[in-house]
Image (cartoon, coloured by chain):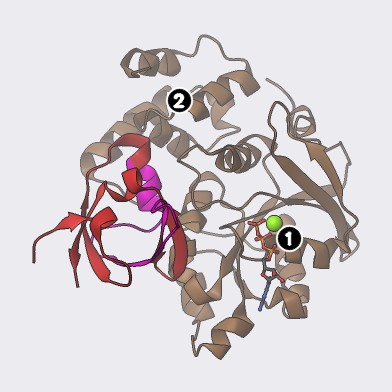
Chain colours: A brown, B red
Amino acid sequence: MPLATELRERFNIHPDPGAAVIALAGNPNTGKSTIFNALTGLKQHTGNWPGKTVLQTQGTFHFGGKKYILVDLPGTYSLLANSAEEIVTRDFLCFARPDATVVVTDATCLERNLNLALQVMEITSKVIVCVNFIDEARRKNIFIDVDCLARELGVPVVVTAARNGLGLTELKAGIDALARGQIVTSPRRLIYDPDIEEAVARLEEKIPGEIKEWINARWLALRIIDHDRSTLDNIRQYFKVPEWGVLRERYKYCPT
Amino acid sequence: MKALPLSELPTGQWGRVVSLKARGMARCRLLDLGLVPDTPVQAVRRSPLGDPTAYRIRGALIALRREEAGQVLVTPL
Ligand SMILES: Nc1nc2c(ncn2[C@@H]2O[C@H](COP(=O)(O)OP(=O)(O)OP(=O)(O)O)[C@@H](O)[C@H]2O)c(=O)[nH]1
Ligand SMILES: [Mg+2]
């Protein structure tokens, strides 16, 4: 099995003991890059994704004496439909395993943003939801019940107006607390129909322990049921597990 | 009211999603865009060549190609 640092290096995250890696994910146009620039002071550096044409941008900031490497991911509505942007985001969350992920949402159309938030929360529990565009929402008389949202999602929620710099200190503090393990989340879990849940439980058992250490087994079992070839191919590629029984079995059923 | 493909919804008009004909990844994509049953959707404008069309879905403008919108059944509101 590759080491954490090796996997991260494939995403151009160079080993830096003591630094935590933070991902910025979200729907297109929710203000991820604005937040990225505000937090990092645009000390950015672009690198090519291994084997992909999509660029990721990374920069650094400090908070509470700790160094943070912030990664600006492309905007996506989903992690399932397999556009290049979605693959980049999904692979980063899966294989680079950020120490925390900020899901940036648009307060003026929050509902549609929560689909991605829930999908991210299926992969990693270290999530903080940033409700951005709160200035626009106020102008449109949209009120966001932040406490209720945090309770329903089971992860911390921070409100920002990134263009005006509002709420960014709170966002940094939230990231810091999450990355240091001072906040423990309990992400809302989607419960599927009983037949799916039963199949998930059966598949989860078959997933090898060394993969479970890296990837949320429940999420992976759901992808196997989905016949999500792209995810499974990339797992084989990153983890070099050519003869993994569950995958073999699943490929038998997968129409090519 | 009779259901029709979203691609046939006249510009400016609202409809409500009844069901999706798409399967597999195409279905996933439509669901991810917010087109789940009971969702109100408006045909906002057509591009000069008639394709794609911009739809208002859950507060955002989303462009769909005719073949994608044709996979969504709506009842006009
Ligand atoms: N009013 C307001 N505008 C904002 C806010 N945050 C960002 N914007 C503006 O929204 C637009 C999009 O912001 P970006 O930061 O490029 O969004 P993004 O999420 O990086 O977009 P993609 O990379 O395309 O997914 C820009 O014009 C920003 O100035 C905010 O909180 N309030
Ligand atoms: Mg951006």
- Nearest the eye: A146 or B5: B5
Kind of residue sitting beneath label 2: Arg
**Figure quadrant of the C terminus of chain A:** top left
- Same chain, marks 2 and 1? yes
Magenta region includes residue A171: no
Q: Is residue A141 above or below residue A244?
A: below
Residue A157 coordinates in the image, percent (x, y): 59, 71
Ligand 1 is found in the corner quadrant, namely: bottom right
Residue A8 coordinates in the image, percent (x, y): 76, 34
Is disc 2 placed on a helix, strand or loop?
helix
Residue occupied by mark 2: A229
Residue occupied by mark 1: A33
- Which range is magenta? B27-53
Crowdedness near tag 1: few (<14), some (14–19) or many (≥20) residues, C-alpha within 10 Å: many
Magenta region includes residue B43: yes
Furthest residue in direction front, as rendered: B48
Kind of residue sitting beneath label 1: Ser
